[in-house]
Image (cartoon, coloured by chain):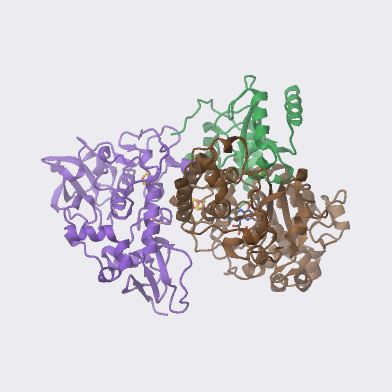
Chain colours: A green, B purple, C brown
Amino acid sequence: MLKVEETQPVEFSSALLAKFDEIVKRYPEGKQKSALLPLLHLVQAEFGWTSVPAMDKVAEYLNIQPIEVYEVASFYTMYFLQPKGKYVLEVCRTGPCCLVGAEKIMDHIEKKLGVKEGEVTEDGLFSWRGVECLAACGFGPVLQIGPEYTFYENLTEQSVDQLIDDLRKK
Amino acid sequence: MSDLVKVTIDGITVEVENGTTILNAARQIGGDIVPPAMCYYSKLKGSGGKCRTCIVKVSKGSEKDPRPMPKLVASCRTTVMDGMEVLNITSPEVLEARAGVVEILLINHPLDCPVCDQAGECDLQNLGYEHGLQKTRYEFERRTFDRIDIGDKIQLHMNRCILCYRCVFTADQITNKRVHGILNRGDHSEISTYIQTAVDNDFSGNVIDVCPVGALTDRTFRFKNRVWFTKPVDAHRNCSHEKCNGKVTLWYKGEDVLRVTARKDQFGEVEDFICNECRFDKKKTADWTLEHPTHISETSVIASNHYETFKPLPVIKENLTLQEANQRELERSFKI
Amino acid sequence: MARKLLLEHINVPGINTLAVYREKGGYRAVEKALKTLTPEEIVEEVKKSGLRGRGGAGFPTGMKWSFLAKPEGVPRYLVCNGDESEPGTFKDRYLMTHIPHALIEGMIVSSFALGANTSYIYVRGEMMPQIRILERAIEEAKAAGWLGKNILGTGYDLELYVQPGGGAYICGEETALLESLEGKRGNPRIKPPFPAIAGLYGCPTVVNNVESIAAVVPIINDGGDEYAKIGIGRSTGTKLISASGNLVKPGVYEIELGLPVEEFIYSDEYCGGIANGKRLKATVAGGSSVPVLPANLTLKYANGDPRLMSYESLSEGGFATGTMMGSGGFIAFDEDQCMVRNTWNFARFYHHESCGQCSPCREGTGWMEKILHKLEHGHGTSADIDLLWDVQRKIEGNTICPLGDAAAWPVASAIRHFRDEFEWHVKEPMKSQSTNYGLANYANPIEKVVVAEEK
Ligand SMILES: Cc1cc2nc3c(=O)[nH]c(=O)nc-3n(C[C@H](O)[C@H](O)[C@H](O)COP(=O)(O)O)c2cc1C
Ligand code: SF4
Ligand code: SF4
Ligand code: FES
Ligand code: FES
């Protein structure tokens, strides 16, 4: 059994629900479950992570069982089932990026942020983790930051410092 | 086109209906050439293909296209073609690959048979016994999960699960609402409800019967006992549940009914799914009309003293490579 | 200069907009296809072109299209595979970022050819920026009448949607992709039935890679025969190669198939040689799933003839001395790279990405990773190398989908060609932690290379 964080019930805004309605229209009648992945992305962008009450609400909206949502959310790596920092730095740790120094970049981020992979900094701003190939191998090392998954390529220790400092000031 | 097709498995030819799988064709022949099936379940739609223990070699595709299939195939999900020739226990390649699958299925298995309720009627135990290697070459820590109760009737030992998906199909197809499923992926996958919800449904208890290992067990199994000390008796009652015919097996120790299960056929599959009332709440002899002692499948460890029925195929006795490949089975047949 | 069919206008400012794309001749293929060709004629052109799927398997696209079942009254679907997660491959992202309309134009022509009225482009969720780009481009195209109802007054309707994935390499496998598109876990389906018979929502479906779909545009513009003139033998046309690793100029290159590998690595038109003046030790020529080759076998066959960038030439020699074209992810390793470490890294990747459905892959990938971790960190024994070989053999060919094979091949090929280096890790555990094995004899002329005995 996974550890489940205690969470408050969530409310979906009418703007969010309007987006849901728009997405569901893409699929044939009765195939609304297809909207599950895009909907979970919207939920995570709104709340910062994918909590059980939010998943239950999505299940209700799509008229499917909650377990069907849990199964999907836990299969894919992009849905955070635990709260994370405001900015999650996801660094590619796969072969080609390692050839050009991805491991050093991860060590540097760990030192700079002072937290281990997956943890949240004290100010709640940052988490980091290694992820698999981001399809930018020729421009490595690379990292991305959600919810819009902006890419930062050809990373150096200096450019990472700069990035983190800029985000802190935001 | 005729509706019957001819297929030859380990040299034995049988005519089966078009669309039959190799596994089911083998089951029609019966005996030792039936591939072991850990995930396929004939009563569950979509099951099979996952455990890979039922792999066989198709040495001739069909009369029309006699080319052999390039890879071993899952017999439970491959349909026969007219004139197909299949090798199971007469192919050293199949036996080796199967031993490989068994070894791999066991690397993360706790091998806690001595304390497992399923011991004696566990498909994995039987499989390891008949097809496995003597000792494991896996030297890393095994994956572990906590044991949990899902509701007051069913216990889940995730460590023992082989992810056959049968219980998931059962919940989807036999009960009206599924609350448990497969979480995470890869070798972190686990059966779970994710949040603490009881699996509570008129037919939920059937997941216990379909589970090939001791991952899902009956919490109401009284006085925990080894199955081989219990005596199974077929019985029935007039069940009021519309989808349950009340035909069960009662497991006795002395005068006590320790547990109630569905009746199982020779391939370890339930004959009919039963309701939770029959399974969990009717544990007095007075609740039932007794029929006769249950026939025990000879492949089960419960019947491990009854191996005299094991007859190696003649072709094995004649062929040296096959003798080597089937060595353990042969030794056993000589011992008896 | 080699011909460029896909990336010709990549550097034109604003090529990502409809206006500029049109100026450069964009959407001509849609006009030609919808107004002057029948769906059957389009399929015929694609067959003639000899185009082979660019997603990895290299299956002829025209043939795949002709297998599509066409029962009455059942919708058919075209789904574009933009999951691009194979380590070393980044061409689709590049194409979608810079010339999104090339993909959309290809989707319209291909959907018309297949008789699909709703098509989806499945893009991995991490490519959110590319998803936005495509969505904007689709809006533009729709506003201009290239999508929607009654396109160009021909009576043909098409709706095109972009679907995000959720982070799973396995969703690049076409049936896992369809499951994912149906809102489920990305478990590959057991085949048969194949998608051409029962795919998305149980309807006949074609799944094609981004680059395959984009290549349909020049095929329709110039004709299949013209396209087939480019390339060599059964490797026709141009191919996008993603070049990464220790190269002077990594990046995406469009090559004419048949280019010598040596020229691709060393010429200034392409990768410009190995970075920092080092020497080439090994390559993975087609994305992480294909066998790794030492430098000498990368550049030449075992008989000394030069190896070319084509489906046939890269696989020349079978697995003993060859590799595969795969998805065109070309990864170069310089002399300071450790093959054991890289093999461990790839094994970790496949372990992480296994869907967990079938036992050999679910359990075997984890086992391989653990053994390799042990070897890489100087705790291995030579029995571990043999065990590793045995475990990969148990996985290969015994799984539901090719991810099992994809996990086994890099391990098998690394042992096959770099066994010395594995053994060095066993014999020199301390040294292997601070230095690396170096180039050894991996770039020596072929004659001296002894191919490790297969067990
Ligand atoms: C594990 C695995 C991952 C795959 N990943 C991709 C991918 O990211 N993109 C892709 O186009 N094809 C991928 N494929 C290949 C697809 O299954 C399929 O063959 C391809 O999309 C067909 O398109 P094509 O004929 O145009 O190449 C993958 C296959 C496997 C087995
Ligand atoms: S719990 Fe039992 S039935 Fe369910 S997947 Fe695991 S082994 Fe199969
Ligand atoms: S081979 Fe691996 S990824 Fe493919 S179905 Fe089996 S477990 Fe899943
Ligand atoms: S390996 Fe890092 S982006 Fe591909
Ligand atoms: S029974 Fe056929 S694969 Fe499991």
Q: Which residue is drawn at the image coordinates 58% and 64% (left, top)?
A: C318
Res. C182 in view: no
- Locate residue A155 relative to residue B220 in the image: left or right: right
| Residue C179 percent location from the top left of the image | 54, 52
Q: Which residue is drawn at the image coordinates 35% and 73% (left, top)?
A: B8
Where residue C52 sits, quadrant-wise, is bottom right
- Locate residue C79 relative to residue B219 in the image: left or right: right
- Locate residue C24 relative to residue A13 in the image: left or right: right
Q: Which residue is drawn at the image coordinates 43% and 63% (left, top)?
A: B73
- Locate residue B134 relative to residue C438 in the image: left or right: left
Task: Spot the residue most to the front.
Answer: C448
User: Residue C154 versus residue A158: which sits nearer the camera?
Assistant: A158
Q: Is residue A72 above or below residue C264?
A: above
Which quadrant: the N terminus of chain C?
Answer: bottom right
Q: Is residue C221 above or below residue C441?
A: below
User: Residue A159 versus residue C182: which sits nearer the camera?
Assistant: A159
Q: Is residue B109 above or below residue C172?
A: above
Number of marks in picture: 0
| Residue B253 percent location from the top left of the image | 14, 41
| Residue B52 percent location from the top left of the image | 41, 56
| Residue C411 percent location from the top left of the image | 54, 51
Task: Spot the residue most to the left.
Answer: B255
Q: Which residue is drawn at the image coordinates 67% and 37% (left, top)?
A: A102
